[in-house]
Amino acid sequence: DIQMTQSPSSVSASVGDRVTITCRASQGISSWLTWYQQKPGKAPKLLIYAASNLQNGVPSRFSGSGSGTEFTLTISSLQPEDFATYYCQQADTFPFTFGPGTKVDI
Amino acid sequence: QVQLVESGGGVVQPGRSLRLSCVASGFTFRSFGMHWVRQAPGKGLEWVAVISYDGSHEIYAESVKGRITVSRDNSKNTLYVQMNRLRPEDTAVYYCARDNAEYGSGPYGMDVWGQGTTVIVSS
């Protein structure tokens, strides 16, 4: 199985900060990388698919980049509603696998 | 609106079985592959299984292979997962989720999620 890692595991930030989360795959996955946001007690929400494509309705302050084995999610100006846990997931090969998550808190 | 609603969770003894359901509405269910994803208490997300839009193909995570079966009834807009020989480590919130591409036309993640149903495996 393809192993996914994320760094950092948690980050403390303030409203207006720029936040970058890194996701690495244990082998190349082309651009088949998805990012989700999850708030406590809620289902995950799709933010970005195919590494850099913003899902409909997701604010433009979210962006994704990368290919191969290294990917980043950037929140350009953190808003109060962005405090959550973020997961990457590879969609290149079954079984799909998720990263362990990055918690963004105040 | 586009919606997925899971049901069937509960408390079950180790070794017993449980069937979860996921009813879809607001979209053409038969056009989309469907996934099950679970989340153990306080843990991250674990992909469990996928079934193709027409039910002809299924793929499972190693952790559940041989113990769970995913199926769908497109006439009822319903996805199922039959879980057998349950173990304490199967305790989790189980989410159904829609493939983010019709007819499996691209690995674009999962764009619609249910609210989840909780399974607790305990004696």
Image (cartoon, rainbow, N blue to C red):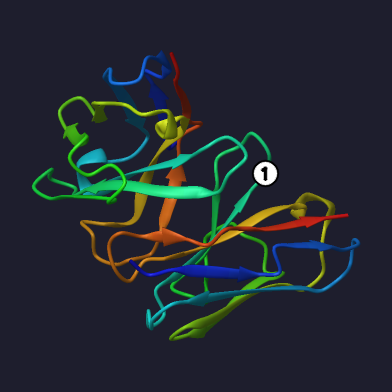
Tell me which amino acid carries mark 1.
Lys
Measured as percent of width and height from the top left, residue A89 is found at 46, 63
Task: Give the quarter of the image for residue A15.
Answer: bottom right
Question: Disc 1 sits on a residue from what chain?
Answer: A
Nearer to me, B52 or A2: A2
Dot 1: few (<14), some (14–19), or many (≥20) neighbours within 10 Å?
some
What residue do we see at 30% from left, 59% from top? A95
Measured as percent of width and height from the top left, residue A85 is found at 67, 53
Which residue is outermost to the left?
A: B56
What residue do we see at 38% from left, 64% from top? B108
Measured as percent of width and height from the top left, residue B103 is found at 20, 56
Question: Which of the image's four quarters has the C terminus of chain A?
Answer: bottom right
Nearer to me, B122 or A97: B122
Nearer to me, B87 or B96: B87
Q: Is residue B40 left or right of residue A73?
A: left
Task: Give the quarter of the image for residue B28.
Answer: top left
Q: Is residue B13 left or right of residue A83?
A: left
Q: Which residue is mark 1?
A: A39
Measured as percent of width and height from the top left, residue B24 is found at 34, 31
Q: Is residue A81 left or right of residue A28?
A: right
Vertical placement of B89 versus A70: above or below? Answer: above
What residue do we see at 18% from left, 33% from top? B72
Q: Is residue B1 left or right of residue B53?
A: right
Vertical placement of B54 versus B122: above or below? Answer: below
Count of numbered tags: 1
What residue do we see at 55% from left, 40% from top? A43
Question: Which of the image's four quarters has the N terminus of chain A?
Answer: bottom left
* Callout 1 secondary element: loop
Vertical placement of A40 versus B33: above or below? Answer: above
